[in-house]
Amino acid sequence: MPELPEVETTVRALRRPLVGRIITEVRNSWPRHIVTPSLSELQRRIHGCRVETIERRAKYLLFHLSGGETLIVHLKMSGHLSVVPGTTPPDKHVHTIFRLADGDELRFRDTRKFGRVYLVKDPQEVLAGLGPEPLADTFTVEALRQLLHGRTRTLKPLLLDQTFIAGIGNIYADEALHDAGLHPERKADSLSEAEIASLHQGIQKVLALGIEREGASIDLYVKPDGEKGDMQNAVAVFRRTGQSCYRCGATVQRIVLGSRSTHFCPGCQH
DNA sequence: ACCGGAGCCTGTTAGC
DNA sequence: TGCTAACAGGCTCCGG
């Protein structure tokens, strides 16, 4: 479920309880969670490592540890991370636990079990191939123009392609296209200069709003502390099928593009 | 290059 | 109420 704003919110919330803490142990009840290395090697290499910094790249959380190791987590559809006392009753959906020196635990709860954990010396092993960060200073209108150049794909699936731009998911793709006034089925190379600028602004605007509102709790997403975000109260089209557009009053439609639900306003997205 | 479909999982919801 | 099918915010692989 989590997209860039939800992952960013999670990273920000985990810094206070985790930075400076020492990991002593890893427990796992769903082997496929751990991509690399093996569980036994992960346990050996992570033991005694201190969490130095935590950052986000696309939808990945990066925990930079002492000793040159980086723990990388992807939440996929249903992942959730929280730091709780080790005495907190177990939850059946917590499949990976990082025990800390003082008995607290970083728990990876993941109902659908799609989440992934990596421990690597070089994060590029995992992150190579990702497109640019849409909120970085280097992601300019000109950069987007060059990315779109020569691409014949439809805008919606292109925005979801993590090798094109990294971090946008289904909610924010629909919201960005609505903000930009662009139909999700437009071809990437058909945009005018003004439309490229609108798309650029739309992408940055909805992602920044998502972060400001601490994520969209539309289905199950909650912040690490269990509280809901507020972005669900600020969406213009996502899952608003049949309701009227706040901008033009037309009825929001749902179609399927690239096997994904797509919501847009036929009145103001062309 | 691009598209569609299947697959990975479990839980919730819509429809009959 | 109960059953079934569809659907879910991610991503990968495969074939055409």
Image (cartoon, coloured by chain):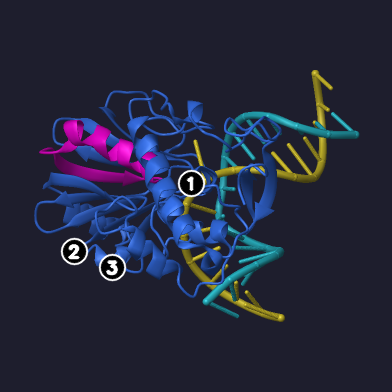
Chain colours: A blue, B cyan, C yellow
Image: magenta residue range: A4-29
Q: Give yes or no for contact between labels 2 and 1 (Cβ–Cβ under 8 Å).
A: no
Provide the residue designation for mark 2.
Answer: A121
Measured in 3D between alpha carbons, the distance from the residue under mark 1 to the one under mark 3, in whole angstroms, is 30 Å
Q: Is label 3 in a helix, a strand or a loop?
A: helix
Answer yes or no: is residue A108 visible. no
Q: Residue A43 carries which label?
A: none
First reached walking from the N terminus: tag 1 or tag 3: 3
Answer yes or no: is residue A41 visible. yes
Instruction: Identify which residue is drawn at 11% across, 47% down.
Output: A48
Instruction: Identify which residue is drawn at 35% across, 69% down.
Output: A129
Q: Give the residue type that dot 2 points to.
A: Lys
The chain holding disc 1 is A
Provide the residue designation for mark 1.
Answer: A176
Label 1 vs label 3, nearer the camera: 1
Q: Give the residue type that dot 3 points to.
A: Glu
Residue A125 occupies quadrant: bottom left
First reached walking from the N terminus: tag 2 or tag 1: 2
